[in-house]
DNA sequence: AGAAATTTGTTCGTATGTATA
DNA sequence: TTATACATACGAACAAATTTC
């Protein structure tokens, strides 16, 4: 037997899928919806709360319920949360990241803008000159972010953001473990140099070589976790300051 | 101001993240939760409905609320829906699929089991001998599914399932357009043969060559949509019978 | 600027169907 | 079978925010 609030969820979804409701539109009032769907206002509200929390609907006190305009945030949050519930393993996470960045590089070589090239050059130079670990981490992270953004692919971008969100919040130790395990920072820097130069020169092979070495280092120096192959323990992190 | 039902959602999420609640566990009754969180039953219910619909909590009439064991289904559904709201473009979708399968192949070559090899052989043979399009589509789809499954990576598997779910439900025309555009079925078949044989022989280069050709064909023969580069129109599909 | 109408936010009461001991 | 606990569902009422006139 279908639950009542599911009818409400389905109704709104249908309206969106059929093109009758668009991002930013206002839904009928809760009382109208209750009457139209032959149910009570409480049930309508339950359905709307679901959509609100998922990020599809935005409820505004005294005003109405609206189709959300931007779901990126909830989307990445939900992805991150589900990954926790599935008990994701660290090496799987790295492989998925490689999957995204590998494809992003292929696309970025052809699509990268001049502005993005400029930013890549700047971050690469800073990466090789700054002296604090946190600064290196920041520029490192920026380079990878620009790489994925330059791909212009929303799937890749969204998933990469969710991945970063997830790593930043719940497994910060992964970053520091890799950094600390990396005795020779120059190897990592050189990998990044090839990656960036490959993009700048439109040389896919060179960039891919750097990117693949980068992930090899992660696998070698990041794989010294005490619990091998087991699901990671989640650690709550209040601050964020991550990435390799 | 934080809404009341969000406190409920946050409470349950915290309990899970802190390891005090695990999949299959029963939550306190709605009345207990209401008292513990200093709110009413209705607000508790609204929070639980959200978690129920997301797939994190399973509400069982007359019994109680439980932490769900399997969220794959809701997860893929949610991903698919959000992709619609974002107005995803077809070529982006193909690129994302290539991202997943490319990485999956890299991993699968090393991890594939004998049982999976056997299934790959069977589907490849059937793919080359059956005469109806729907049968070819079925075996084609199976090969790609096994490829990704053999990677053993939950990120790749989940996203691939979501992607298929999405394509099957909302852009079936993409599949048929590619099939119809493919005048020479042998080219596609040969790409699949190299892909499968590469996995069977542990030959990554051979497999990757087949896989990349496969996606080239999709790009060439699937790119003849009337609306070029624009967001796809969503079409509702009652039946499913897809994939290339 | 202010009052009235509208709409969402929150709580309570009640009735009913279901699962479990 | 009965009793209890629980979830489902509806309706009503008031509070609080927003919009409208």
Image (cartoon, coloured by chain):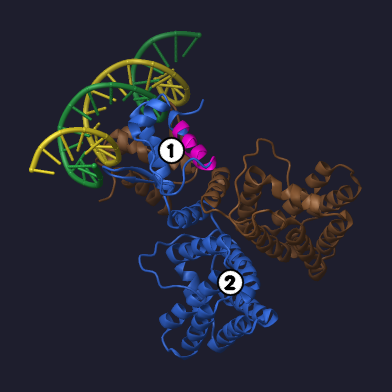
Chain colours: A brown, B blue, C green, D yellow
Residue at which label 2 appears? B223
Residue B16 or residue B53, whichever sits in front: B16
User: Real-space Cα distance between discs 2 and 1?
Assistant: 36 Å
Tell me which residue sits at (44%, 78%) in the image. Answer: B138
Magenta span covers which residues?
Answer: B7-18
Residue A52 point in image, percent of width and height: 45, 39
Tell me which residue sits at (54%, 43%) in the image. Answer: A74
2 and 1 marks in contact (CB < 8 Å): no
Tell me which residue sits at (85%, 62%) in the image. Answer: A194
Residue B13 in magenta stretch: yes
Direction right: furthest residue: A129
Residue A186 point in image, percent of width and height: 89, 56
Considering only vertical position in the picture, is A30 above or below A126? above
- Is residue B4 left or right of B59 when viewed as pictured? right
Residue B98 in magenta stretch: no
Residue B165 or residue A138, whichever sits in front: A138
Tag 1 subunit: A
In what element is the residue under mark 2? loop
Label disc, if present, on residue A26 of the rendered structure: 1
Q: Can residue A218 be seen in this view?
A: yes
Q: What secondary structure characterizes most of the magenta part? A: helix
Considering only vertical position in the picture, is B100 above or below A171? below
In what element is the residue under mark 1? loop
Q: Can residue A19 be seen in this view?
A: no
Direction bottom: furthest residue: B129
């Amino acid at each position: 037997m279908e639950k009542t609030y599911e009818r409400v969820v389905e109704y709104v979804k249908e309206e969106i899928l059929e093109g009758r409701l668009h991002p930013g539109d206002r839904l009928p009032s809760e009382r109208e919806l209750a009457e139209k769907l032959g149910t009570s206002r409480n049930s309508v509200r339950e359905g709307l709360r679901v959509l609100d929390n998922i990020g599809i609907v935005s409820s505004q006190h005294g005003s109405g319920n609206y189709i959300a305009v931007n779901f990126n945030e909830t989307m990445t949050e939900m992805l991150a949360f589900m990954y926790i519930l599935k008990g994701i393993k660290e090496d799987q996470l790295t492989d998925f990241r490689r999957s995204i960045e590998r494809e992003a590089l292929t696309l970025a070589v052809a699509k990268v803008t001049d502005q993005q090239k400029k930013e890549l050059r700047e971050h690469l130079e800073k990466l090789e000159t700054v002296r604090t670990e946190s600064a290196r981490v920041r520029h490192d992270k920026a380079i990878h972010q620009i790489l994925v953004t330059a791909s212009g692919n929303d799937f890749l971008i969204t998933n990469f953001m969710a991945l970063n969100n997830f790593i930043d919040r719940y497994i910060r130790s992964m970053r520091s473990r890799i950094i600390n395990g990396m005795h020779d920072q120059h190897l990592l820097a050189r990998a990044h140099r090839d990656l960036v130069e490959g993009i700048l020169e439109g040389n896919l092979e060179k960039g891919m070589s750097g990117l693949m070495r980068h992930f090899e280092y992660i696998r070698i120096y990041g794989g010294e976790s005490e619990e091998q192959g087991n699901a990671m323990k989640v650690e709550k992190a209040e601050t964020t300051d991550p990435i390799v």
